[in-house]
Image: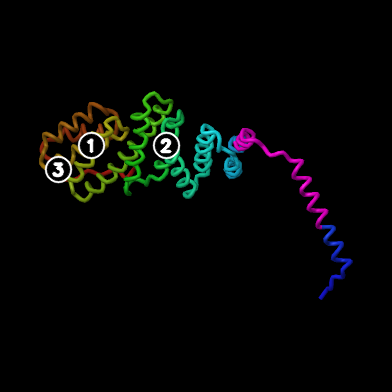
Amino acid sequence: MLKHTPAVLGTVVLLLAGLTAAGCGHAKTQPLLDSAATYAKAESFMTARKYAKAISWLQKVNTAQNRELRAQVHLRLADAYFEQRSVLDLAEAKGRYQSFLNAFPLSDQASYAQYRFAQCLQRSTNKPERDQTPTFQAMGEFRKVHDLYPNSAWVDEARAEMAALEDHLSRDSLLKARFYYKRKSYAATDVRLREILRENPDWEGRDEVLYLLGMSLRIRGRVDEGDDVLRKLQADFPESDYGRKARKVLGRSGPTSEQPAVSASG
């Protein structure tokens, strides 16, 4: 084992003392950034999409004496987590947007925070044919943008997102209607199809919805009702495949005894 003589120990102590002094002197030559400069540095990382670094700098901003800056830092931290997109980051962002709304309900950024909070829920929605509870929750939160902040710049964005979610629900209902139709559960088929026509009457897949509803009614012996639906289909979509199919069915008389083929497309 190496033994340290008093002379060697004295040298080490002197070296350590010199390094410490140098370190302290170096620290004194680096002025601490003020709150505005620290925040600006964080924003530069946000602009560069370096969100982890932005989070680190945002957490250094001293907001103790500035409520407005505290609100802005709170919101930008939520944005940084939101942009990182992982499941954990999304959960963190959702919590931060919610806490911002609780802490700063009168902020001029509240409508934006509400919109982003709804987007967090939107990113958690499931594919069609699975549980759509998150979809309904997201729609409810987007609706709050309109209800609570009717003059906000985010109202149109929220409406567009709601329309997209409504289309998502319509696809879900149509897939379930096909499932019931193939299994000859026509009452359940009708419920899903009428749900689409009621909630999303302008949906692009409405021609198939009308066709399946008309044929389901005919199979069940409700020929007049089914023919009324098929006539509407023929009038609204005369050139679509389903419109042409409806024309052929209406050219025949009597109830439908067999199921027509159901599209497998989404």
Other-residue count near label 3 (Cα within 10 Å), few / some / many at <14 / 14–19 / ≥20:
some
Where the C terminus falls, by quadrant?
Answer: top left
Circle 3 is placed at which residue position? 219
Q: Residue shown at 50%/35% (left/top)?
A: 71
Image side of residue 111 versus residue 178, left or right:
right
Q: Residue shown at 26%/34% (left/top)?
A: 199
Element assignment for label 3: helix
**Residue positioned most to the bottom:** 1
**Of the residues shown, which amino acid type is indicated by label 2?**
Leu
Circle 1 is placed at which residue position? 211
- The residue segment tinted magenta is 16-42
Nearest to the observer: residue 237 or residue 64? 64
Indicate yes or no whether the magenta region holds residue 29: yes
**Residue positioned most to the right:** 7
Nearest to the observer: residue 100 or residue 160? 100
Between the C-alphas of marks 2 and 1, the distance is 46 Å
Circle 2 is placed at which residue position? 101
Find residue 232 and report its horizontal and vertical position in percent.
Answer: 20, 29
**Of the residues shown, which amino acid type is indicated by label 3?**
Ile
**Of the residues shown, which amino acid type is indicated by label 1?**
Tyr
Indicate yes or no whether the magenta region holds residue 221: no
Between the C-alphas of marks 3 and 1, the distance is 12 Å
